[in-house]
Image: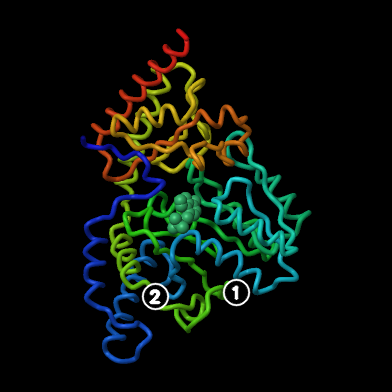
Amino acid sequence: MNRIYADFNATTPLSVVSRNSMARAFEIWGNPSSSHSHGRQANEIIEESRCFVARAAGVFPLEVVFTSGGSEANTLALMGSFFLKAPQMRLLTTTVEHSSVRDTAGLLQEQGVPVDYLQVKRSGLFDLEVFESQITEFRPTLVSVMAANNETGVLFPLKEIFQICQQRGIILHTDAVQAFGKVSPEEWNFCDLISITAHKIFGPKGAGALIVRRGTPLVATHYGGAQEIKRRGGTENVVGLLGFGGAASEISTPDQIEKVRILRDSFEKTLLETLPGVSLNGADVKRISNTSSIRFEGIASEVLLGALDLEGISVSAGSACSSGSISPSHVLLAMGLNKQEAKECLRFSWGKTTSREEVDTVLQAVIKHVTRIRDRKRKA
Ligand SMILES: Cc1ncc(COP(=O)(O)O)c(C=O)c1O
């Protein structure tokens, strides 16, 4: 069976360029910190990768701090700010962040750091006036707002958010893990701290970066050496970083992004026109071009997900699955869906390798199974 993958927000397949870059790294096994030629060679290829990543993100190579991925980059941004000015730190973030930001914020709160949350509306966004008044009242030293939400694809207005923060001397961190490769970097690369990862852009898992824009203060959270200009100690994952560089060297072009948008939009339009009781989360606001979070009224997400899986189609319930039970997504609950509604949502996310035929096959399968499951429920 030829499986169809519609879960590119979870991870992406490894590109040939990324794989070949990693194969090259297996031959260059020196320690990048050694000053002899074996070490210098390894160091050189890491720096080459850093340039590819920096170019794809539209920043300077020296601003790229390699990490083990997006979660570590998020943790470094928040904890590194805490270590820098623990007694004065005050964090403002949103209720829809990835768990790596949410859980770190929770830990900071336990350490006595005042943390406040921006509540989103049904659209998935908050009002800028509310943001401004919350900032004035709460006086954060660090604001952390993701660029694009992983479950709904909703894009936050970072330019306006940055302007408000900059006027008040507040550092802005953004988790751009889902925006990198899906939105022009000009939409997010002005932030002070930016998290990205390789495995959402057709690179390997276990490699990522925190971009620390020039002049942004930050303290390391990993120690053990002067790597990454003392901002992240530890011998580098040379193979993973080469794979990251390879993937970044062929970051999606505007044409590729647009092609995905056309497929995604036609998928949504046909579904909404064909099936009753179907709604789109984040329908009325700007979203990344590849994501649809859809509620199928009356159908538990795991039932539809299972039926599609049996047909060879991989999608996501957009919620954490633990010990067999699917818990409702905190993102959808934060947007005002109740538990029942949140448990009726599936996330479809496409990539630059997705074909029209694949999207059409998924469409037909979704229509068939939603109709069948509802008919069966009606008769029961
Ligand atoms: C928005 C967002 N932030 C952070 C991460 C974590 O990245 P990584 O898997 O590289 O740790 C993810 C991964 O799903 C994500 O979607």
| Badge 2: residue crowd in 10 Å (few <14, some 14–19, many ≥20) | many
Depth check, front residue: 294 or 108: 108
Residue at 66% in and 69% down = 82
Residue at 35% in and 40% down = 350
Give the colour scheme of this rendering. Answer: rainbow
The quadrant in which residue 111 appears is: bottom right
Depth check, front residue: 130 or 10: 10
Provide residue 73's location: percent of width, then percent of height: 50, 64
**Could you give the CA–CA distance between mark 1 and mark 2, rounded to whole angstroms?**
22 Å
The quadrant in which residue 331 appears is: top right
Depth check, front residue: 276 or 61: 276
Residue marked by disc 2: 236
- Direction front: furthest residue: 323
Quarter in which the N terminus is drawn: top left
Provide residue 369's location: percent of width, then percent of height: 37, 21
Q: Please, is residue 317 above or below residue 370 in the view?
A: below
Of mark 1 and mark 2, the one earlier in the sequence is: 1
Provide residue 149's location: percent of width, then percent of height: 51, 46
Kindly report which numbered mark, 1 or 2, lies closer to the viewer in this rendering. Answer: 2
Mark 1 lies on a secondary structure that is loop
The answer to whether the residue bearing label 1 lies less than 8 angstroms from the nearest atom of ligand 1 is no
Asked if marks 1 and 2 touch (Cβ < 8 Å), the reply is no
Residue marked by disc 1: 217
User: Where residue 86 is drawn, which disc sits there?
Assistant: none
Name the amino acid, label 2: Glu
Q: Please, is residue 163 above or below residue 62 in the view?
A: above
